[in-house]
C-alpha cells in the first residue's frame, strides 16, 4: 500500500514538472518571437499642450536625438511616420488618447504611462523638466515597459459617447453654481428662496424674489432656465443613444436606482465586460476601495482611493444614495447598506453609501457579462433556503 502511494506521489510530481516545463517552453517561444520583431528605436515623449519634447534611443541605449515638436496631428505625422517600427512611451493626459491612436496607426508600439504609479515619479525628483521626462520615459520603455504601469485608452467610439455625458455634467455643474449663488445672494438680505429642484428653480424662485433684487437676479434665473433646457436636450440624446446604439444598457437598468445616464455611462466607461477577469475588480478600478497603509500593528482607517473615472464614480454614489433613500426598494443592496449604517461610528452613513456604490458596480458588471435577470433579494432568498435546510 505504501509502495503504491509512493508511486502515485512520484507520478504526480512528474506530471507537475512536465506541465511546468511545457509552460516555460511556451513562454520562451513567445519571448523569442517578440524579440524577432525588430524594434528600430526607443522613444519617450513628454506631451505638452502646445509643444512636446521627445528623446530617441538606439538599441544600445545611446541617445540619438532630442528635440521638440508641436502637439498637433501634423507635427506627429511629420516626425514619426517615416521612422521604422519603434517602441514609444507617453504620459497619460489630455492629448494621450489621440496621439497614441495616431502613432499606433503608423505601426509603432505605444505605451501610455501611468505616472501616479511609476517609481521615481515627478514629485520624488529634485530635477524636473520636459527634456528629462522624455529621457526617463525612453529609458524605461527600453528596459522594461511594465515599469510604466501602462494603461489602455478607450476606443474612439466610446470616447465620443462619453463626450455627450461629460458635456451634460459640465452644464449641470454650472447650473448648480448659479442656483447656489442666487440663494446665497438673496440670503444675505434676510430672504430665502423656496425649496425646489434645480429643474424648476428658475420658475419657482422668480415669484419669491424681493422687488429690490428682482432686476439684478432676473438674468441669472433666465440663464438657469436656459441651462435646464440644454440639459433636457442632452437627456433626450442620451436616451436615444442608450436605446439604439447600446441596447445592452437595458440589462443594467433592471436595478432600481440605475437609470439611462448611469447605465450608458457604465457601458461606455467599462467598454468591454471581458476586460475584467472578476467582477470584483470593478471596485478598485473605479477607486471605490479604501486606501491601505498598514505598518506593524498600525492599521489606520483611510478614505477611498478615488482612482479611475470620476464621473462614473460620482454616478454610482448617486445611485447608492437613491437605493438607501426613502424611495429605494427593498433589495440585497439596500439591506447591505443599512447594516453598515446601523453600526454607527464616525461617518457610518457615508461608509454605507460607498459600500453600496462599490457593490452596485460589481453587480452591474455581473449582469452585463451574463445577461441574467436581476433578482433584488437573491442573496436573502438563498440564505433563507439554507436556514430551512439546516432546521429540517
Image: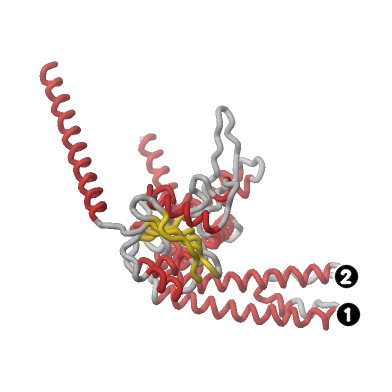
Which residue shows up at 77% across the image and 72% down it? 182
Disc 1 and disc 2 in contact, CB within 8 angstroms: yes
303 or 369, which lies in front?
Answer: 303
Horizontal and vertical percent position of residue 210: 85, 77
Horizontal and vertical percent position of residue 263: 46, 65
Horizontal and vertical percent position of residue 40: 32, 59
380 or 141, which lies in front?
Answer: 141
In this picture, residue 182 sits left or right of residue 269: right
**Residue 268 in view:** yes
Q: In the rendered view of the protein, which quadrant contains the C terminus? A: top left
Crowding at mark 1 (Cα within 10 Å: few <14, some 14-19, many 20+): few
Q: Earlier in the sequence, mark 1 or mark 2?
A: 2
**Dot 1 lies on which element?**
helix
Q: How many marks?
A: 2
Which residue, given by chain and number where applicable, does mark 1 sit on? Answer: 212
Q: Is residue 243 above or below residue 89?
A: below
Residue sticking out furthest to the top: 2
29 or 240, which lies in front?
Answer: 29
Q: Is residue 13 above or below residue 239?
A: above
Q: Is residue 173 above or below residue 136?
A: below
Q: In the rendered view of the protein, which quadrant contains the N terminus? A: top left
Mark number for residue 189? 2
Amino acid at each position: 500500500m505504501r509502495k503504491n502511494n509512493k508511486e502515485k506521489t512520484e507520478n504526480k510530481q512528474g506530471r507537475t514538472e512536465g506541465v511546468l516545463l511545457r509552460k516555460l517552453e511556451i513562454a520562451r517561444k513567445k519571448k523569442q518571437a517578440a524579440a524577432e520583431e525588430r524594434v528600430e528605436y526607443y522613444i519617450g515623449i513628454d506631451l505638452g499642450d502646445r509643444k512636446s519634447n521627445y528623446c530617441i534611443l538606439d538599441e544600445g541605449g545611446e541617445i540619438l536625438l532630442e528635440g521638440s515638436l508641436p502637439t498637433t496631428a501634423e507635427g506627429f505625422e511629420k516626425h514619426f511616420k517615416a521612422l521604422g517600427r519603434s517602441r514609444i512611451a507617453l504620459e497619460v493626459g489630455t492629448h494621450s488618447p489621440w496621439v497614441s491612436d495616431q502613432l499606433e496607426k503608423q505601426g509603432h508600439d505605444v505605451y501610455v504611462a501611468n505616472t501616479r504609479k511609476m517609481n521615481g515619479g515627478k514629485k520624488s525628483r529634485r530635477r524636473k523638466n520636459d527634456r528629462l521626462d522624455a529621457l526617463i520615459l525612453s529609458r524605461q520603455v527600453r528596459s522594461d515597459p511594465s515599469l510604466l504601469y501602462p494603461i489602455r485608452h478607450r476606443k474612439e467610439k466610446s470616447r465620443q459617447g462619453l463626450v455627450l455625458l461629460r458635456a451634460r455634467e459640465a452644464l449641470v455643474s454650472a447650473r448648480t453654481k448659479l442656483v447656489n449663488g442666487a440663494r446665497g445672494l438673496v440670503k444675505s438680505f434676510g430672504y430665502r428662496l423656496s425649496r425646489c429642484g434645480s429643474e424648476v428653480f428658475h420658475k419657482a424662485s422668480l415669484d419669491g424674489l424681493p422687488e429690490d433684487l428682482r432686476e439684478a437676479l432676473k438674468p441669472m434665473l433666465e440663464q438657469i432656465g436656459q441651462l435646464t433646457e440644454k440639459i433636457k436636450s442632452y437627456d433626450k440624446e442620451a436616451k436615444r443613444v442608450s436605446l439604439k446604439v447600446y441596447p445592452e444598457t437595458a440589462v443594467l437598468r433592471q436595478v432600481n436606482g440605475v437609470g439611462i445616464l448611469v447605465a450608458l455611462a457604465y457601458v461606455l466607461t467599462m467598454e468591454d465586460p471581458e476586460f475584467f477577469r472578476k467582477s470584483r475588480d470593478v471596485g478598485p478600478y473605479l477607486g471605490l476601495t479604501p486606501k491601505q497603509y498598514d505598518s506593524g500593528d498600525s492599521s489606520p482607517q483611510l478614505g477611498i482611493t478615488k482612482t479611475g473615472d470620476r464621473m462614473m464614480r460620482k454616478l454610482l454614489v448617486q445611485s447608492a444614495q437613491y437605493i438607501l433613500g426613502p424611495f429605494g426598494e427593498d433589495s440585497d443592496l439596500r439591506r447591505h447598506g443599512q447594516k453598515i449604517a446601523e453600526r454607527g461610528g464616525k461617518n457610518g452613513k457615508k461608509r454605507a453609501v460607498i459600500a453600496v456604490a462599490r457593490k452596485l458596480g460589481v453587480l452591474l458588471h455581473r449582469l452585463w457579462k451574463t445577461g441574467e435577470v436581476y433578482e433584488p433579494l437573491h442573496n436573502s432568498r438563498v440564505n433563507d433556503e439554507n436556514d430551512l435546510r439546516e432546521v429540517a
